[in-house]
Image (cartoon, rainbow, N blue to C red):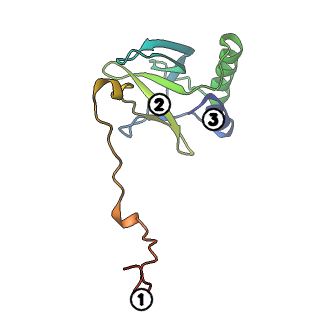
């Protein structure tokens, strides 16, 4: 999800909730402790220089059960971050403390934000000798458009 999308959703919400991939909710007393811009410059295993930029949200659970993060407060923090850090409309990555710091993608189901799993990948499979997986079409979805019918002369 891009920054413009989360802002659009926050304008329509009365409360902010995040759901983990397991289906559990992040406790309602969480805080967004950071909104940041993360620039990553790296060389993949094939020797190609690459750059990535994401907007990072860090969620944190405090023992402060009396305060809840309301949509307008999160919007204010985002707008301050946009102005101060020069944020563009990049993808959002969310950090959350599990057994270690976990990184998630972000989606929205119409009611709450969904933390989505992220996976590592080789960006230079052609350089590493890793075969590219071919997609396997489902035979039931293939439409036969042959004009070969009995008496048509195609056989």
CA–CA distance in space, label 3 to label 2: 13 Å
Residue 134 picture quarter? top left
Above or below, comparing residue 76 to residue 40 in the picture? below
**Disc 1: CA contacts within 10 A as few (<14), some (14-19) or many (>=20):** few
Residue that mark 1 sits on: 151
Q: Is residue 122 left or right of residue 106?
A: left
Q: Tag 3's secondary structure?
A: helix
User: Could you tell me residue 84's position as x and y percent?
Assistant: 69, 10
**Which label's residue is closer to the chain start, 1 or 3?**
3
User: Could you tell me residue 51's position as x and y percent?
Assistant: 51, 16
Q: Is residue 110 left or right of residue 117?
A: right
Q: Is residue 70 left or right of residue 149?
A: right
Relative depth, front residue between 154 and 109:
154
Q: How many marks?
A: 3
User: Could you tell me residue 141's position as x and y percent?
Assistant: 40, 64
Residue that mark 3 sits on: 5
**Looking at the figure, which quarter contains the N terminus?**
top right
**Disc 3: CA contacts within 10 A as few (<14), some (14-19) or many (>=20):** some
Q: Which mark is residue 4?
A: none
Residue 110 picture quarter? top right
CB atoms at circles 1 and 2 under 8 Å apart?
Answer: no
Q: Tag 1's secondary structure?
A: loop
**Which label's residue is closer to the chain start, 1 or 2?**
2
**Looking at the figure, which quarter contains the C terminus?**
bottom left
Residue that mark 2 sits on: 105
Above or below, comparing residue 14 to residue 31 in the picture? below
Relative depth, front residue between 85 and 138:
138
Query: Residue at 35% across / 23% down in the picture?
Result: 98
CB atoms at circles 1 and 3 under 8 Å apart?
Answer: no
């Amino acid at each position: 999800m891009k920054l413009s999308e989360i802002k659009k959703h926050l304008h329509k919400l009365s409360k902010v909730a995040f759901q983990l991939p397991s289906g559990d909710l992040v406790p309602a007393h969480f805080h967004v402790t950071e909104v940041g811009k993360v620039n990553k410059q790296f060389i993949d295993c094939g020797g190609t220089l690459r750059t990535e930029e994401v907007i990072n949200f860090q969620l944190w659970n405090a023992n402060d059960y009396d305060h809840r993060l309301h949509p307008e407060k999160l919007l204010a923090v985002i707008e301050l971050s946009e102005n101060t850090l020069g944020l563009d409309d990049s993808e959002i990555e969310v950090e959350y403390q599990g057994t270690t710091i976990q990184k998630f993608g972000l989606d929205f189901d119409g009611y709450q934000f969904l933390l989505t799993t992220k996976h590592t990948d080789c960006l230079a499979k052609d350089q590493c000798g890793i075969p590219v997986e071919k997609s396997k079409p489902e035979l039931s979805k293939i439409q036969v458009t042959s004009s070969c019918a009995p008496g048509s002369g195609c056989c």
